[in-house]
Amino acid sequence: MGFLCLRARDAGSGESGGGVRAEAAGSQADGGGAPGEGLEGDGCRTEMFTMVMNVFMSMLWGGTLIGAHSKLDMVVGTDAVVEESHTSKLPYLCAVMKEILRLHLALLLLVPHCPSEPTTVAGYAVPKDSRIFVNVWAIHRDKSVWEDPLEFKPERFLGEEKKRRWDFSGNDFDYFPFGSGRRICAGIAMADKTFMWSLATLVHSFDWGMRDGEEGIDFEEKFGIVLKKARPLVAVPTFKLARPELYE
Ligand code: HEM
């Protein structure tokens, strides 16, 4: 599992808001680089990958998350940290998580599946013991299902615009970031809870930015069975809660 290692340092009087600036580093166990070098997104596994994408998306679509910020401030307040009990009251953030998992799922082709009997799928004969890779990456970008499939639009999972259930059950073959069938991800419940909480905490407790002198975000990913960022993401969080002791 991926963890964030937060290391605070005094940012000096020039820092906006006069607060403390923190650097977040992937733990070394995740291959995330040495602590203090920034939030490293390479060499990550599913959880760390998604965690990093949360931050990444927050930065890239900062405007999108303004709504999430204000809702979080309403539900949690600016003088408290996010608790697990808050997460069920944050439907917009849940939609953000689903959208991240639509566009940036870690296992692009799931794990290889193998039919125990010969079968036919959409008219194609599939022999017993075939090795099957399901291209969820392409399915999640299918133009005939998703409006503006390459756009980051959490709203598609909400309210009036929500045409389908699009949950993590694996029963909808247009959206199944955790796979489907008997080999569906065994950690959905844990992933769902920990990611909602992590995402809420990252958005609520920090403002995110880039390192001084850096412009734009490198979006490139490296293809493989497990998707990785082509180059590490370095994100700089700034404390934004009212009391520094909330970060202890
Ligand atoms: C956002 C986080 C995660 C994502 C996106 C994810 C996604 C996946 C996917 C796509 C599969 C393959 C399913 C298939 O081929 O049908 C899988 C399998 C699996 N996942 Fe996860 N997973 C996540 C977190 C976790 C966690 C936290 C755990 C454990 C606590 C976990 C345990 C497993 C196991 C054991 C399998 C293999 C199941 C089997 O083959 O029978 N996953 N996961």
Image (cartoon, rainbow, N blue to C red):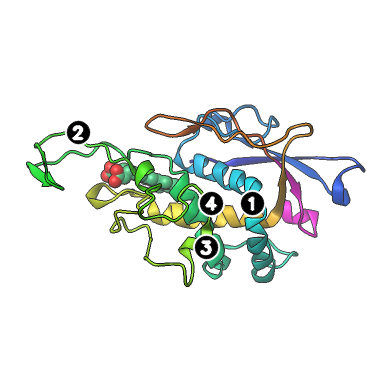
Q: CA distance from mark 1 to mark 4?
A: 18 Å
Q: Are marks 1 and 4 in contact (CB under 8 Å)?
A: no
* Mark 1 neighbour density, 10 Å: few (under 14) some (14–19) many (20 or more): some
Q: CA distance from mark 1 to mark 2?
A: 39 Å
Residue occupied by mark 2 = 131
Residue occupied by mark 4 = 152
Q: Are marks 4 and 3 in contact (CB under 8 Å)?
A: no
Q: CA distance from mark 4 to mark 2?
A: 32 Å
**Left or right of 153, for residue 226:** left
Q: Are marks 1 and 2 in contact (CB under 8 Å)?
A: no
Three-letter residue code for mark 2: Arg
Q: Position of residue 115 (x, y in %)?
A: 14, 41
Q: CA distance from mark 4 to mark 3?
A: 9 Å
Which residue lies at the image location 50% right of the left edge and 44% below the top edge? 50
Q: Earlier in the sequence, mark 1 or mark 4?
A: 4
Residue occupied by mark 1 = 202
Tell me the mark number nearer the camera, choosing from 1 and 4: 4
Tell me the mark number nearer the camera, choosing from 1 and 2: 2
Q: CA distance from mark 3 to mark 2?
A: 36 Å
Q: CA distance from mark 3 to mark 1?
A: 20 Å
Q: Which numbered dot is residue 155?
A: 3
Q: Earlier in the sequence, mark 1 or mark 2?
A: 2
Quadrant of the image where one finds ligand 1: top left
Q: Earlier in the sequence, mark 3 or mark 2?
A: 2
Say whether residue 233 is visible: yes
Three-letter residue code for mark 4: Phe
Three-letter residue code for mark 3: Glu
**Left or right of 14, for residue 144:** left
**Left or right of 111, for residue 231:** right
In front here: 78 or 135?
135
